[in-house]
Structures are given as structure tokens and as C-alpha cells.
Image (spheres, coloured by chain):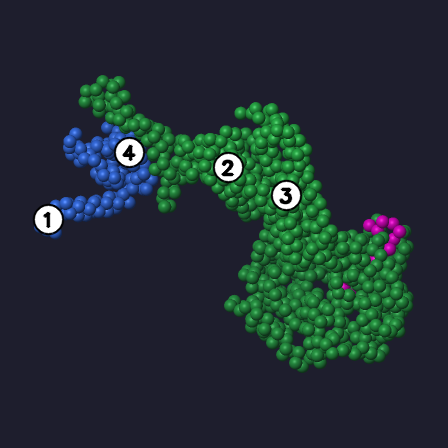
């Protein structure tokens, strides 16, 4: 078999040589034969003639020879290809419509598939990535779904859970890197020593961190990412041992990672040891994860996830046995969950992506149906030609392969155009924020994707050919040849097929339209949610103070002088500081213990958003005051043990009493009396994680001095456009410390808008898809109706000659389109309901079946149908009986 | 003419292989050689000779090479390949079995039944 293929290949690549050789060989034979005849006494002329006659037709012998070498198939293919090209060039309108349809549909699918491929399908760039798990603590009954893992978890579990070959922790961060005056803020990761071995991908140069480097005194080492090494160290091969200044502390470079290293979506450029003190690893700190530190683990070969999970559960149970807080933890529904790392990382975006792919696929179906209809119409026009050719001996296989060649040619060229559209589409997705999707940085247009697209195009070509070939083959030769009209008899079956295609097209477009409507409405409802404060005219930014330079006292001083200086900026109305601003993307919760509150049976301690505020934070953010007073700059200066809670908190703990004057402890345990905070005010509840955050868990605001954290967010209310204050704010901070930049400088409104990108972009794409679907459906309906008019010209002419009014003719076609529309809409409503069901996961406060949306979709489809049928029915009414009857 | 035998279907390939096995030949030579070795009994139709040669070459049973003919013309010479040699052996054996069996069958007399 292989040899035969090789021989065929040889002949194909040197086709000229083959033909010339064959001609020469046959000529040689005939001449030899003629010579022989001459020798036996024939005259040369007669001999030459006789030899040729005896040999038979040269062409037919050559044909037989080619066939024996398997060449006839290729010759036939080439013939069919040139025939298809000629046909397509003869009908440029059809060809352009078909190619454009294919390009748009395939391009849209390619675009979405590119995202699906890089986000959901392509494995993580590590060894056996499907064995990588992430483990996190959850306290569902306390309203804390996800709390990461604690240092204690790590040190207790390491080496004690046999289901895992190894286990590691990491935390994301940003640090100031570089020499004084030349600093840059860089994304970093702090990781435990076994992080790289767990992933199965470590430094290309140098070594990984050791156990000795995990204390705060001994952690002065760093591993660089490949790009950081190239850019900052000029790819110096002797970089090991050189110094890198992190937060103004020098660290020794001990390794450089390979270029392929990328942990999930992180852009970390410098890796540091996750150092800690012994007291941070004690059992008391077991439940203090706060969603900052995350744990990964590599599953032992042959061990299932379920086995690993039960080992974790057993290990937790053993540890909790002597935990004084065990009851409270158990009441909170505590568990440590192990889930696959990749799937977990993309879990939130998965339904949206699949939905968009379904939408793109529906678009492709609509486009395919359009093409089939157009091709069917064209095939009807060629019934007679085909019948003649079949009568002259064209085989059934030939009729089929001719169609396949033509449709595949169309889809392939359309696919190539689709590649261009897909490349553009991927760029559009970038604009729409695809880069910020989990693993979105991997989205790229590459050869693998292109080949998938071309294979899909070929498959589509073959699928499209099926109905056309079926139509061509089922024609009765006799009927077709006898029928007098050019278009042949109108096949009832073909008509039903065309009409049912239009109905399904309308139904699909309706579904897309309704789906896009649901997404749009969901976005609108999300946008209508109040964030709980006045988001206009507020500028916010994050300032990270390195612990090495800023002790707790220094932080307070910094905040103090920052507030002073900002107050003098022009246009500033009020300014404040908080350790975590709403919509920052960070959302850790912590516990509080309310004096006098006894946990009811089944009730567990709750996680609350807990803030530290300084300056005039509440006024700057525009919180509404419900009772008592705000915390002011004075509170933070005097370090009073006071606090403000929000509506939800007050309502939960003191449903029948005033919250003012009540007392609580920060943390999950009752402490000494002197450590309580007194509630001095109640403010409106604010959203932290996003507008669509459903659970109102309650929030507590402490004076900043009691809740000093890594970073400080500054919030400034101004009478000017908030962005215009950005430079001034950065300048103020540099005046205090020239090494400290302001990060993430965005107005509050921008933060809120950005937080909706996961809703807005899909809604936009779905809108785009349904717009295209609508256009395609209009083209399809128009094409089929036009054809129906053209085909019934004689009939219409006859009827008009017998007295039918143009209005009657017009309404006949109008009713036809109305019937198609009604059929499509009924199916579409059912489809829209199913779509809505499937979309529930990504919808916000929108039911699966929304009457307004269905009505709107029906209206749009109705207008579309009407427009599509106007021209053809008008044309029908304009038919002149004389002309129509005189034709042929 | 009364000496010529009809070529049985499927035997042409076998005869070509045999002809070529004796000495490399060009197409016309193959025809002459078959005529010669069959004692002028078999005249192969010229039209079907070349498709057969191309088929055998395609199946790697014979190999072709351009060379110089007796009268100094460029001609394509066919030789038997190793696969072809094996095929010829098998087909000859098969043919002999068939001939023996058919001859035995045809020579049967009524007494032997």
C-alpha cells in the first residue's frame, strides 16, 4: 500500500515526465511494429497506417495507462475543480454571498474556539497537569465559601497525606523592585520550597528555594522569571549570585525560570520564598487563611480525587479533635476541598464561554442552512443540464463528487477568509477584555488553530454537499427532460425542504436574539444595582508600603501626612483611607464576636467584611449615615476603640434594638472587656466583590490603627473629573516617599464598570452574533421567496391574465412569509426557553422566559421577515402576464 | 491462424512477468517475446499491453528504466523486481495446479466415475 502511494506520489510530482515518457514509449512501439510490417513487405505508408490501426486509439490506451497508475481520479478531480470554479465565477453574487456567510460564521466560531481552546482545553504547561489539585478551606454556613489555606494547614499537612506526592503554598503579591530611584512595581509570587517540584517545572538556571530560606531572617533570595532576566539582566548567564533589590532589601538571585513557566494567569516576574515566623504556623492560626495563601498539591499516581478528599477530611478531623474552637468551626460547615487546579481556575468563566460557543455554532448552523438553500435553488435551475449529462453517461458517483468538490471549494475558500476574520475577532476579544480572563493571556492565533479551522471547513463542505447530492440524484431523468420550463418541475419535496430550512433558521435566530436579550437585560439589572455609596467623582488608588521600611507606627504616620497633603490639593472635597476599597478585587472576610450574642442552635459564626478606615473615608465615598456618626480623622488619631457597622450587620445582630452603644470583639473569640469596640454609627451596606454579590454578610469599619494591613487604598472625592486628580495624587505620595508609587489608580465608577466586564463582553458578543444571524436569516428568507416568485412566473402571469389583482398576488407571498415566520417563532420560543434554562448560571435576576424579551425578539424577527418578503412579493405583483406567458 | 489460442482472462500479467523474467525488455519486445515463447500461439492485443505494464509497475512487480534499443532508439525497459519474481513463482504454481486439475477432470471417462 505504502509503495503504491509512493509510486503515485512520484508520478504526480513529475506529471510532465510521466506524460512525455508514455507518449514516447507508445510511439516507439508503433514505429517498431511498422518497421516489422515494412520488413515483411508492406509499403512504409501502408505499414504506418496499419500499425496505428492495429494498436487502437492512442488516447484510450493512454487513459487506461493513467487509470492503472491511479491518476484518473486526480484528473477527474482537476476537471471537477475547474468546472466548479467556472460555475462559481459565472454567479458572482451567489459566490460572494456564500463566501461572506462562510467567512463570518467560521470566523466567529474560530474566535470563540480560540478562547475555549486556550482557557478550557489546552493543558497547563506543567508535567502531568491533570494531577495538579488546589485545596482550599470553606466555611459555607458562615458565609465564607472560600478562604484559601493557612500556613498552619501547610505545615500540618505536608508529608502527612499520602494521596499527594507533594504539597505547596503560594501567595500573589506586588513589590517594588530595583535600585532607589529606578524602582518598578512588579507582580511577584511568594512560594514554598516545594512549589516548583509540585508543578514539575523548576528553574532552568540555578536552584529552587530551600527549607532554610523560609524564615523572615533567612529569606534573602529570589528566583527570576525568564522575561525579567532578559529585560533586567540582559540574559546574563552568570546572573546567579547577583543582587536584586526587593522593597529596598537586597536579595541574591538563585535561579531563573524557563520561558514556558507561567503559573495559571499570574504575570509574576520575581519569585520569593514564602517566609513566616514560627508563631504564624501554630494550631491557633489554622483557620486564619483569609483567602490570601493558596495551596496546590500533586496527586499520587493511581490515587483518585475522592480518595485524596477523604484523606484530607480524615486528617482535618484528627487535628480538630483537640481544637478548642472545634465546635464553632464544625458549625460553620468547615471543610478543606481538593479540586482540579485547571478546572477550578476557569470554573467561573466556563459556562459563559460554552454559551458563547453555542451561540457561534448556532450562527454557523444558520449560515449553513442559508448556503444549502441557495445551493438547492441553484441546483433546481440546473436540473435539466444535469439530466442531460446523466443521460449521456455521467455516473451517480460523478454527480455526487461534483457537488462535494464545489461545496468543499466554497467552504475552504470561506474558511481561509474566516481565518482572517478569526484573527481580527481575537483582537476584538482582547479589546473586550479577554486578556483578563483566567488563562486569557494564552489566547493566540496559531497554526494548530488554523488547521482545526481548515479541517472544520472541509467537514462542513462535505456536510453541505449531502442535501444537494440527494436532490440531484433523486431527479427523474425522464421528467426533467420532458418538463418544458427552464427550471424543470418544482419538486414538492425540495420546496418543503427549503421552507423547513427557513423555519429552522428563523427559530435559531430567534433563540440567539432572545439569548442576547437575556444577557443584555441581566447586564442592565446588574448595572442598576446600587453599590451602596455615591460612586461618582471619587478617585481611588492603592499604595503598598513595604514592611521593611514601614512599621505599624510608620504606616500610621504615612497615612496621617498623606491625608494632610491631599487636603490641600485643588478640587478635593474630602479624602480617606481604607485597607480594602470596594471593587478592589480583594474580598477576604473575617469573624467578629458580638457581646451578648449567643449562637442559636444551627447558627454559626459569620464572616464579615472588616475594614480599617482613616481620614474622612465615609464622606469621601459618599456612604449614607443611618444612625449615630461616621468615624472621623479624630478617631484614627486618638485610637479610640470605636467602630461603625453597616445596615445588614445591625439588622442581623440587633433586629429589635439600636446598634449604637453595642459592643463587639474583632475576631472569633470573646476577649477581655477592655478590648471591645463600641458601635458609634450605622452606615448603608456597600458591595465589595461586585454589584451582583448576593449575600449581605454585614461589614464592620474599625479605625485604621486597629486594622493595619499590607496595602492602603486612598479614596478622594473631588469636584473635578476624578481622573484629572491622578497625577497630583501620585506627586503627593512621591513627596512623602519617592520610592512609593500609586497603583491601580481608577475612579470608583471605572472600578464598577470594569467589574461588569464579565457580563458586558458576552452580552456584546451575543448581540453581535444575533445581529449577524438576523442578517443571514433575512438573506435566506429573501432568497427563497425570490426563487418562489421566479419559479411561479408563468402561473402568476396566467392568473393575472385571468383577472387576479396584484394585491392578491402580493398577499399570497406575504402569507407564505408569515407562515414561515410563525413556524419559526413557535419553535424559537421553545428554543429560547431552553436557552434561558441553560443560561441561568450566568444570568442575574432574569428568569429564563422573559415576556418582554420574547415579544421584542418576535417583533424584530417579524420586521425582518416583512422586509425580506417586500421586494420579492412586489416583484411578483409587477409580473406582466403577456411577458410571462410569452416566455419560451 | 488456427494455431492461435485465446488469451484467458488474468493470464496476461503472468505472461508479461514471465517474458520480463528472462531478460529486460521494452514493451514491443514483451509482445514479441510472448509470441515467441508461446510458439506463435499467443498474440496479445496491443491496446491492452501497456495498461498491463503500467499496472504491474504500479504494483511494484516490474521496474522500468530508460535504455538504448537494438536500433539505437531510446526505449523503456522493464525488469522483474523481487516481488515480481515471487508473484511469478506463485502464479506459475497456481496455474500448473489448475491445469492439472482441469486436465484430470476433462480426461475422466465414464468408467472412472
The residues tagged by marks 1 and 2 sit, at their Cα atoms, a distance apart of 66 Å
Is residue A412 at least partly visible in the picture?
Answer: no
Crowd class of label 4 (few under 14; some 14 to 19; many from 20; radius 10 Å): some
Tell me the tag on residue B110. Answer: 1
Which mark is first along the chain, 1 or 4? Answer: 4
Under circle 3, the secondary element is helix
Residue B97 lies left or right of residue A97; in this view the side is: left
The residue that label 4 is drawn on is B48
Residue A616 lies left or right of residue A197; in this view the side is: right
Q: Chain of mark 2?
A: A
Tell me the tag on residue A406. Answer: 2
Residue A420 lies left or right of residue A613; in this view the side is: left
The residues tagged by marks 4 and 1 sit, at their Cα atoms, a distance apart of 42 Å
Residues at discs 4 and 1 both on one chain: yes
Q: Colour of chain A?
A: green
Q: Colour of chain B?
A: blue
Is residue B18 at least partly visible in the picture?
Answer: yes
Q: Does A48 appear above or below A94?
A: above
| Residue at 82%, 77% in the rendered image | A595
Crowd class of label 1 (few under 14; some 14 to 19; many from 20; radius 10 Å): few
Under circle 4, the secondary element is helix
Amino acid at each position: 500500500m505504502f509503495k503504491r502511494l509512493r509510486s503515485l506520489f512520484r508520478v504526480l510530482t513529475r506529471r510532465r515526465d510521466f506524460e512525455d515518457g508514455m507518449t514516447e514509449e507508445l510511439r516507439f512501439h508503433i514505429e517498431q511494429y511498422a518497421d516489422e510490417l515494412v520488413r515483411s513487405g508492406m509499403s512504409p505508408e501502408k505499414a504506418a497506417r496499419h500499425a496505428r490501426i492495429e494498436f487502437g486509439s492512442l488516447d484510450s490506451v493512454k487513459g487506461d495507462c493513467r487509470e492503472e497508475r491511479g491518476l484518473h481520479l486526480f484528473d477527474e478531480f482537476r476537471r471537477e475543480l475547474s468546472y466548479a470554479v467556472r460555475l462559481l465565477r459565472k454567479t458572482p453574487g451567489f459566490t460572494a454571498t456564500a463566501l461572506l456567510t462562510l467567512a463570518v460564521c467560521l470566523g466567529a466560531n474560530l474566535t470563540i474556539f480560540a478562547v475555549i481552546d486556550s482557557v478550557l482545553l489546552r493543558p497547563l504547561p506543567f508535567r502531568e497537569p491533570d494531577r495538579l489539585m488546589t485545596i482550599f478551606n470553606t466555611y459555607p454556613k458562615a458565609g465564607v465559601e472560600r478562604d484559601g489555606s493557612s500556613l498552619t494547614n501547610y505545615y500540618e499537612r505536608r508529608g502527612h497525606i499520602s494521596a499527594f506526592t507533594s504539597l505547596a503554598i503560594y501567595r500573589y503579591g506586588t513589590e517594588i523592585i530595583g535600585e532607589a530611584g529606578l524602582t518598578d512595581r512588579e507582580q511577584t509570587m511568594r512560594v514554598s520550597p516545594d512549589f516548583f517540584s509540585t508543578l514539575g517545572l523548576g528553574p532552568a538556571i540555578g536552584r529552587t528555594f530551600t527549607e532554610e530560606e523560609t524564615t523572615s531572617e533567612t529569606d534573602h533570595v529570589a528566583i527570576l522569571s525568564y522575561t525579567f532576566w532578559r529585560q533586567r539582566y540582559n540574559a546574563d548567564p552568570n546572573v546567579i549570585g547577583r543582587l536584586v533589590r526587593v522593597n529596598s532589601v537586597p536579595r541574591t538571585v538563585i535561579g531563573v525560570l524557563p520561558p514556558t513557566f507561567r503559573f495559571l494567569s499570574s504575570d509574576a516576574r520575581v519569585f520569593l520564598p514564602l517566609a513566616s515566623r514560627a508563631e504564624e504556623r501554630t494550631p491557633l492560626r489554622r483557620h486564619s487563611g483569609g483567602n490570601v495563601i493558596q495551596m496546590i498539591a500533586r496527586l499520587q499516581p493511581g490515587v483518585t480525587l475522592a480518595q485524596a478528599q477523604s484523606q484530607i477530611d480524615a486528617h482535618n478531623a484528627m487535628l480538630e479533635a483537640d481544637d478548642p474552637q472545634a465546635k464553632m468551626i464544625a458549625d460553620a460547615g468547615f471543610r478543606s476541598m481538593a479540586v482540579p487546579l485547571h478546572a477550578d481556575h476557569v470554573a467561573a468563566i466556563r459556562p459563559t464561554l460554552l454559551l458563547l460557543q453555542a451561540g457561534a455554532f448556532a450562527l454557523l448552523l444558520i449560515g449553513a442552512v442559508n448556503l444549502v438553500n441557495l445551493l438547492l435553488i441553484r441546483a433546481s435551475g440546473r436540473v435539466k443540464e444535469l439530466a442531460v449529462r446523466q443521460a449521456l453517461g455521467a455516473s451517480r458517483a460523478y454527480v455526487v463528487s461534483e457537488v462535494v468538490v464545489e461545496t468543499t471549494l466554497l467552504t475552504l475558500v470561506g474558511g481561509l477568509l474566516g481565518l482572517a476574520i478569526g484573527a481580527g475577532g481575537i483582537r476584538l476579544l482582547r479589546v473586550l477584555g479577554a486578556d483578563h480572563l483566567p488563562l486569557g493571556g494564552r489566547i493566540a492565533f496559531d497554526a494548530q488553530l488554523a488547521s482545526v479551522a481548515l479541517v472544520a471547513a472541509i467537514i462542513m463542505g462535505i456536510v453541505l454537499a449531502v442535501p444537494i447530492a440527494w436532490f440531484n440524484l433523486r431527479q427523474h431523468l425522464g421528467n426533467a427532460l420532458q418538463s418544458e420550463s427552464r427550471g424543470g418541475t418544482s419538486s414538492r419535496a425540495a420546496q418543503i425542504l427549503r421552507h423547513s430550512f427557513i423555519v429552522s433558521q428563523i427559530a435559531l435566530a430567534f433563540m440567539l436574539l432572545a439569548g442576547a436579550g437575556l444577557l443584555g437585560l441581566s447586564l442592565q439589572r446588574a448595572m442598576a444595582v446600587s453599590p451602596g455609596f455615591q460612586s461618582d467623582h471619587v478617585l481611588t488608588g492603592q499604595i503598598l508600603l513595604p514592611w521593611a521600611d514601614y512599621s505599624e507606627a510608620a504606616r500610621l504616620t504615612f497615612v496621617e501626612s498623606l491625608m494632610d497633603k491631599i487636603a490641600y490639593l485643588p478640587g478635593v472635597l474630602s479624602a480617606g483611607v481604607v485597607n480594602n476599597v470596594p471593587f478592589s478585587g480583594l474580598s477576604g472576610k473575617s469573624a467578629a464576636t458580638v457581646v451578648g450574642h449567643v449562637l442559636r442552635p444551627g447558627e454559626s459564626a459569620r464572616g464579615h467584611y472588616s475594614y480599617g478606615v482613616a481620614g474622612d473615608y465615609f464622606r469621601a465615598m459618599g456612604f449614607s449615615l443611618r444612625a449615630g456618626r461616621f468615624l472621623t480623622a479624630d478617631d484614627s488619631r486618638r485610637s479610640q476603640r470605636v467602630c461603625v457597622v453597616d445596615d445588614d450587620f445591625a439588622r442581623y445582630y440587633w433586629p429589635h434594638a439600636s446598634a449604637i452603644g453595642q459592643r463587639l470583639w474583632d475576631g472569633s473569640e470573646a476577649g477581655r472587656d477592655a478590648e471591645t469596640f463600641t458601635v458609634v454609627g450605622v452606615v448603608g451596606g456597600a458591595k465589595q466583590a461586585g454589584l451582583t454579590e448576593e449575600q449581605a454578610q454585614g461589614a464592620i469599619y474599625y479605625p485604621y490603627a486597629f486594622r493595619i494591613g499590607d496595602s492602603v487604598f486612598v479614596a478622594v472625592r473631588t469636584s473635578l473629573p476624578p481622573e484629572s486628580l491622578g497625577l497630583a495624587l501620585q506627586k503627593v505620595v512621591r513627596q512623602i516617599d519617592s520610592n512609593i508609587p500609586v497603583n491601580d489608580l481608577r475612579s470608583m465608577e471605572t472600578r464598577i464598570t470594569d467589574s461588569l466586564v464579565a457580563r458586558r463582553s458576552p452580552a456584546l458578543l451575543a448581540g453581535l452574533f444575533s445581529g449577524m444571524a438576523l442578517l443571514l436569516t433575512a438573506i435566506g428568507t429573501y432568497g427563497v421567496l425570490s426563487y418562489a416568485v421566479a419559479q411561479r412566473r408563468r402561473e402568476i402571469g396566467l392568473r393575472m391574465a385571468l383577472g387576479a389583482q396584484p394585491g392578491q398576488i402580493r398577499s399570497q407571498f406575504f402569507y407564505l412569509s408569515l407562515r414561515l415566520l410563525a413556524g419559526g417563532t413557535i419553535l424559537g420560543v421553545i428554543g429560547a426557553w431552553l436557552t434561558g434554562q441553560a443560561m441561568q448560571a450566568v444570568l442575574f435576576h432574569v428568569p429564563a422566559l422573559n415576556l418582554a424579551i420574547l415579544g421584542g425578539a418576535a417583533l424584530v424577527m417579524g420586521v425582518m421577515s416583512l422586509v425580506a418578503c417586500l421586494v420579492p412579493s412586489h416583484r411578483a405583483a409587477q409580473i406582466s402576464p403577456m411577458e410571462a406567458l410569452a416566455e419560451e | 491462424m488456427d494455431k492461435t489460442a485465446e488469451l484467458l482472462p488474468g493470464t496476461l500479467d503472468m505472461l508479461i512477468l514471465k517474458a520480463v523474467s528472462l531478460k529486460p525488455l521494452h514493451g514491443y519486445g514483451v509482445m514479441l517475446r510472448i509470441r515467441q515463447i508461446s510458439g506463435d500461439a499467443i498474440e496479445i492485443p496491443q491496446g491492452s499491453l501497456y495498461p498491463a505494464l503500467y499496472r504491474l509497475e504500479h504494483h511494484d512487480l516490474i521496474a522500468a528504466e530508460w535504455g538504448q534499443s537494438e536500433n539505437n532508439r531510446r526505449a523503456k525497459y522493464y525488469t522483474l523486481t523481487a516481488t515480481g519474481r515471487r508473484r511469478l513463482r506463485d502464479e506459475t504454481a497456481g496455474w500448473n495446479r489448475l491445469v492439472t486439475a482441469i486436465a484430470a477432470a476433462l480426461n475422466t471417462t465414464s468408467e472412472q466415475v
